Image (cartoon, grey):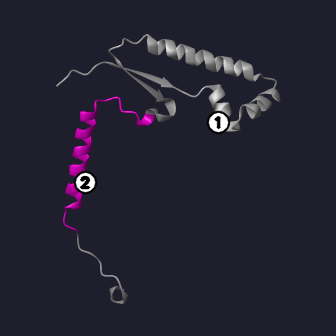
Amino acid sequence: MAANRPRAVFVTRETDYELLIAHHATRGQARFFLETRGQRLEDVEARHDRFHAVLGTARASVPADWRQTLVSRADLNRFLFARRRHCRRRAGRAGRQRRQISQRPAGPRRQSGAGSL
């Protein structure tokens, strides 16, 4: 069995620019929204570009023999940090417990209908 290589996990969240585009659908509408509030879209885009440049630099600084993963902060609760074989073992145990519960004999059942009152 091969040894597991180290893994670098980069957790990111959406930039302000990505949130604006997701909310307003187009760059023009995002620009209008910001300008009505005294802000400039160019400033938001510059921060977005700077963020992705820094992220690229950080990912490039990871040794080449390491694995890399990019995870959105919104998906972090579903991301598995553990090795998969540990997770399978846990799922197997839960499956056995479910089978044991479903195989238990059922208790006495009440009769339904007019005669049960």
How far apart are the two marked residues, 2 and 1, measured between alpha carbons?
A: 42 Å
User: In the image, is residue 22 above or below residue 54?
Assistant: below
Outermost residue, left side: 1
Q: Is residue 92 magenta?
A: yes
Q: Split into 4 quadrants, where in the image is the N terminus?
A: top left
Residue numbers of the magenta segment:
77-106
User: In the image, is residue 32 above or below residue 10?
Assistant: below
Give x and y (percent) for residue 59.
45, 15
User: In the image, is residue 43 above or below residue 31?
Assistant: above
Dot 1 falls on a residue whose secondary structure is: helix
Q: Does the magenta stretch include residue 35?
A: no
Q: Residue at x 35, y 29 (%)?
A: 81
Q: Which residue is drawn at 67% across and 33% down?
A: 21
The amino acid type of the residue labelled 1 equals Ala
Q: Nearer the viewer, residue 80 or 110?
A: 80
Q: Split into 4 quadrants, where in the image is the C terminus?
A: bottom left
Give x and y (percent) for residue 109.
27, 75
Q: Residue at x 28, y 34 (%)?
A: 84
Question: Would you say 41 lies left or right of 12 here?
Answer: right
The amino acid type of the residue labelled 2 equals Arg
Give x and y (percent) for residue 35.
81, 27
Mark 1: give few (<14), some (14-19) or many (20+) Cα within 10 Å.
few
Residue beneath label 2, please? 98
